Image: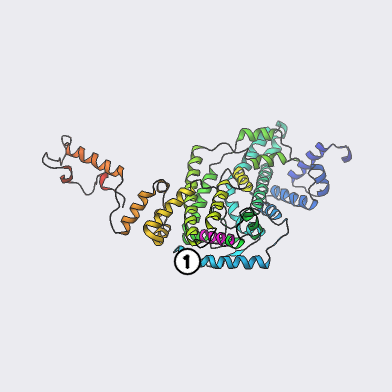
Amino acid sequence: MADDDRNPEEEFQELMRRLMSGDMSGLDPEQLSRLSGMQIDPAMMQAVMNQLQGAFSGAQDGIDWSLAERQALHIANQDGLGVSAGQRTDIDQAFALAALWLGEATTISDLPRPAKAVTRGAWVSATLPVWQELAEPVATSIADALTDALGQQAPEDMQEMIAGAGRLMRTVGGSLFATQLGHVVGRLSTEVVGGGDVGIPVMPDGDAAILPQNFADFGRDLEIPDDQLALYLATRELAHARLFRHARWLRLHVISQVREFAHGIRVDTDALEELASRFDPSQPDELRSALESGALLPQRSEEQTAALTRLENLLATIEGWVDVVTEDATSRLPSAARIAEAVRRRRAVGGPAEQALGSLVGLELRPRRMREAAAMWRAVTDAVGVSGRDGLWDYPDLMPSAEDIDDHAGLVARLTAASRGEAAPSDAMDDALAQLIAEETAGGSAPGDASPAGPDRSADDAPRDDDDPTPGDQRPV
């Protein structure tokens, strides 16, 4: 049969056979684009062909994250706008004054490098390594599941070919996920105002930035002077960056908890197998939509829900501290309270891109207990001062827990007692346990006990083995 007499399906099968044999000679990218019905630019199709050839030759293994970067930068730079000299000057002045104000509101030191105004594209390039690290467990899971599902759906006479094409399937699935991640990060770059706007440490350590291109959108309906908005946002951005710079362990703590959540994600194999049964490699839109909508991610397991709760409490603790420090530092701003409320609402609701990230990775990066955490930090500040409050970030075991957010009175009592050099007051459970032990000891011990408490001796007077203290002696300081 002449080549011109073959139908598109036969041409596609011939193309797959050539790809799997590693023979890319004579393939025309423009003809391939027409065959697939995707109408992709021939230059882009050539890049895809090179990627596929690399997959079969063994030169490429894993996910090509450069696809995410290219897609994100394409969206971030599509308006062609940069940062004007005037915008840079205004932002630089806001950061300079914010740094002075923060010096009065926190004992955590300034950053080693000046904060700056950046473009959307610069934000993408700076933050993408962190997004990649967070998304990699999910991407790998989806790529592996896609390989298995397509293999199960293939006809018997194609099983051998599918078995030899595992690298291709993994590459296709991983590439689609990387492209969608790039799409989401690119959209995020059009919404975020600062480097720490999403709550997690996506900027390089010690860096702080504001995106002037998005600044106008943030304040459009607030009717607040731009200089006040810039000062408030610069102060908040610096506070966030200073905290992560000071508590070096905190960045790893946050990233580890996000990855712990992501590693628990398992693809909904039933949904994926149904999708694979009708998957057309020349029409990847359905798979792309399924990835972005989160349709392939099943409901959270109990372990994931617990991991998400821990992460939300951690993010709320961080955001609450940033809120209190920013409030104190910007007390001179007439509109500070209104701007703060706008920031809280914005963080609580999340933008379209943040919601898309939640669908793609299954994770919503919104601290739901931020107000409660801020109330805790305010109470701590009032009780032990700025230095005592900021000292809680010196070591991981000093940081307030979720229970402290619920009952910050107990935390305040412990901190004030410690500041006076006193033993921390025991809680109700300690008191009840001590009383129970005292009653049991006073009531007499079982026959054969080596050291019974006599009838004329109270439980407190009974001798104790120092090597075996009772639980009532183990009270937290």
Residue in the picture at 23% in, 41% down: 435
Which range is magenta? 229-240
- On the image, the x and y values in percent for residue 220 come to 64, 54
Does 112 sit above or below residue 384? Answer: below
Pointer 1: what residue?
Answer: 103
Outermost residue to the left: 456
Res. 195 in view: yes
Kindly indicate the quadrant of the structure image that contains residue 151: top right
- Graded by Cα atoms within 10 Å as few (under 14), some (14 to 19) or many (20 or more), the crowding at tag 1 reads few
Answer whether residue 370 is magenta in the image: no
- 284 displayed left or right of 317: right
- Quadrant of the rendering where the N terminus is positioned: top right
Q: From the image, give the main secondary structure of the stretch colored magenta.
A: helix
Answer whether residue 239 is magenta in the image: yes
- On the image, the x and y values in percent for residue 437 come to 23, 40
Amino acid tagged 1: Gly
Disc 1 is placed on an element classified as helix
- On the image, the x and y values in percent for residue 256 come to 50, 50
Does 84 sit above or below residue 276? Answer: below
